[in-house]
Amino acid sequence: MKISICNKCKGFDHLQIIKLLEKKYNNLNFEIGCNNMCGIGRNKIVIIANDIPIIANDVNELLKKIEETIN
């Protein structure tokens, strides 16, 4: 699965998110850089998983939404 994550958004720590995802899932390919979702990324966690934007208020919500996307 390809995960795009911004390293400039201030709403979350991208390194923490990457570490959590690497522990939970195998075979993730991370693309780090701006996703042009700066407005949302100021207050929420924003990643793009296989070209599907996933927006969450916290890490637990993010993990739940990723699980739904995988299945």
Image (cartoon, rainbow, N blue to C red):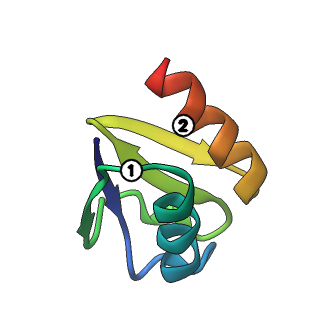
The percent coordinates of residue 7 (x first, y second) are 39, 80
Q: SS class of the residue under badge 2? A: helix
Specify the label residue 48 is tagged with: none
The percent coordinates of residue 8 (x first, y second) are 41, 82
Q: Residues within 10 Å of mark 2 (few under 14, many from 20)?
A: some
What is the quadrant of residue 67 in the picture?
top right
Q: Residues within 10 Å of mark 1 (few under 14, many from 20)?
A: few
The percent coordinates of residue 9 (x first, y second) are 48, 76
In the image, residue 51 sits, relative to residue 3, either above or below, namely above
Q: Quadrant of the N terminus?
A: top left
In this figure, which residue is indicated by the disc labeled 1?
Answer: 26
Task: Identify the residue shown where x is 42% and y is 39%.
Answer: 53
For the residues labelled 1 and 2, the Cα–Cα distance comes to 13 Å
Q: Which of the two discs, 1 and 2, labels the residue nearer the N terminus?
A: 1
Q: SS class of the residue under badge 1? A: loop
Q: Amino acid at mark 1?
A: Asn
Specify the label residue 66 is tagged with: 2
Task: Identify the residue shown where x is 75% and y is 57%.
Answer: 58
The percent coordinates of residue 69 (x first, y second) are 48, 25
Q: Amino acid at mark 2?
A: Ile
Foreground mark, 1 or 2?
A: 1
Who is closer to the viewer here, 49 or 25?
Answer: 25
Left or right of residue 59: residue 38: left
Task: Identify the residue shown where x is 27% and y is 72%.
Answer: 32
Who is closer to the viewer here, 55 or 60?
Answer: 60
Total marks in image: 2
Proximity of marks 1 and 2: CB atoms separated by less than 8 Å: no
Residue farthest top in this picture = 71
